[in-house]
Image (cartoon, rainbow, N blue to C red):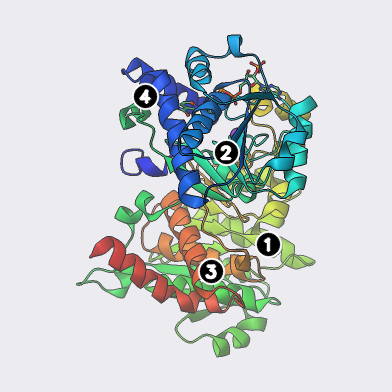
Amino acid sequence: MAQIASTQLLLTPNEMGMADKAAVVAGESAFTLMASAGKAVADAIMTRWSKHSVLVMAGPGNNGGDGFVIAQALLQHGWPVTLAFMGQIDVMSEEAQAHAKAWQGEWQTLSPTQLENAELVVDALFGAGLSRPIEGVAHDMLEAVAQSGLPVCAVDVPSGLDGETGQVFGVTVNAELTVTFFRKKPGHLLFPGRGLCGELMVADIGIPVTVLDELNLQTWENNPELWYQKYPWPRLDGHKFHRGHAVVYGGETMTGASRLTARGAMRIGAGLVTLAAPIKAWAVYATALTGVMVAKLEQSQETEDFEELLLDSRHNAIAVGPGAGLAGFERIRTRKIALTALLTGRATVLDADALSAFSEDPQILFDAINGPCVMTPHEGEFMRLFPDINNSPEINNTPEIKKNHPDNKLTRARLAAKQSGAVVVLKGADTVIAAPDGLAIINSNAPAELATGGSGDVLTGFIVGLLAQGMEPFDAAAAAVWMHGEVGNDIGAGLIAEDLPDHLPKVLSTFKTQYFS
Ligand SMILES: NC(=O)C1=CN([C@@H]2O[C@H](COP(=O)(O)OP(=O)(O)OC[C@H]3O[C@@H](n4cnc5c(N)ncnc54)[C@H](OP(=O)(O)O)[C@@H]3O)[C@@H](O)[C@H]2O)[C@H](O)CC1
Ligand SMILES: [K+]
């Protein structure tokens, strides 16, 4: 995947440091890299804003070094620039010292009073090297910038934002523009970070792409580049059986949920979809669904009937959870149905009630996962299913977690995938898709409108529909999450879950034109 989607790779600040070093070993000079970084930011500023009085805040490390380059470039173009420095020049890196010496304007020591005459702020206080909460004058300054309402251009990250986790170290600013270098960082895409960066630009500063080969990177931003080559377009000579047969379990009470799942599976191209429902609800399903077949599960032998239905090996993908039911005996039945699905070893999606039904003994569920499986918890379901990842002092004290503290959504999803053996889709505005082997994708195209009842049920349908067509779980999950986001964008304001499957053809046709013609 690394080779086919190098531009989608995300580097943690630590990995970025390694890429930087590898570039220097390969012959790039650290001085030139910093010059290119600063120039890229200055160019972006001059493209976006007309000539303004600028305050450049430069910190003690190389982020501050970039600040000197930016200040000098803007000064040369006739911009009124104030440079506010915090640090000690003689302990800075050689390249930062050299660029600081090249600064031809006036020096000031960082202080909130400098904001009085500023119209634009360049934030080059801290970047990848931030290692602890910001205190003292830098803290007061960032707070004052935030309160001033002045437009901010952040260098690499808004200072205070952890480029690895998207979490804030005490204080930060809300940037209008963030210019980062070489590749995006996970913290640009994970909330709250994503909401703080404003427009995000990635500047090429001359780091050769070959340095990526050495790094064993495992994180990407979701994009069709990652999976379009495995996308199961219907074959011209195809038959509906080539496109798989998805089975969706439907409960007795919340029948809308699994209907949305079934419709999602149809729309994304499953050849056939069967909704299997307890006899009491059968008529509701049979009346409401046209293209979807409805199978009866007789009273008191629902699990046995479900098992029998799955004896037909053409039923190659199964979804359990939306509307499955958790009240009273339904909880036990949902568990049995989920375990029955998993026992077949066929591709299975577990969502909603199928996850919550195991909240008291999740290990029973994890032990049953032996085949291709995708779990799609939202944060609440995740907390119930993986309490130790969120709470255990033992886990929180391991060096791994200390570095990637539990607020790190990426790490939590990865650990959950490893612990359960399933691909985990940890849903939210910044959905993370993680595989048991550590590969992970952050999704970034979902609009706020998707946070609506039933939206997740459709996503489950998209995933099971792609699984039925033979896509691997990690790719199917990534493709479905991306399509779901695109459909959401396409509909926009006023979106309801029912719209999602029916707007998919438009998104699919754009995708097809873009990647297959
Ligand atoms: N390839 C690239 O990406 C390039 C990036 N460049 C820029 O370099 C920065 C990263 O530079 P680095 O020096 O590693 O880190 P910072 O500038 O963010 O800051 C490090 C200094 O800050 C001190 N520090 C850390 N946390 C705090 C704090 N909470 N309060 C006060 N001071 C803090 C730290 O001190 P230590 O005691 O922890 O060592 C350092 O002195 C990257 O973001 C890019 O902007 C290059 O220009 C070129 C290539
Ligand atoms: K910064």
Decide which of tag 4 and tag 3 comes sooner along the chain: 4
CA gap between label 3 and label 2 equals 44 Å
Measuring from the top left, give residue 20's x and y in whole percent.
43, 23
Give the mark nearer the N terminus: 3 vs 2. 2
Compared to 293, does 182 lie above or below?
A: above
The quadrant where residue 332 appears? bottom right
Neighbor class of circle 1 (other Cα within 10 Å; few <14, some 14-19, many 20+) is many
Residue 289 located left or right of residue 21: right
Q: Whole-Å distance between the Cαs marked 1 and 3?
A: 24 Å
Position of 71 compared to 174: left or right?
Answer: left
Q: Which residue is mark 4?
A: 214
Q: Secondary structure at mark 2?
A: loop
How busy is the neighbourhood of tag 4: few (under 14 within 10 Å), some, or many (20 plus)?
few
Q: Residues within 10 Å of mark 3 (few under 14, many from 20)?
A: many
Mark-to-mark CA distance, 1 and 4: 43 Å
Query: What SS does tag 1 mark?
Result: helix
Which of the two discs, 1 and 3, labels the residue nearer the N terminus?
1
Q: Mark 4 or 2, which is nearer the eye?
A: 2
- Tell which circle, 1 or 4, labels the residue nearer the N-terminal end: 4
Q: Is residue 145 left or right of residue 263?
A: right
Alpha carbon distance from label 4 to label 2: 43 Å
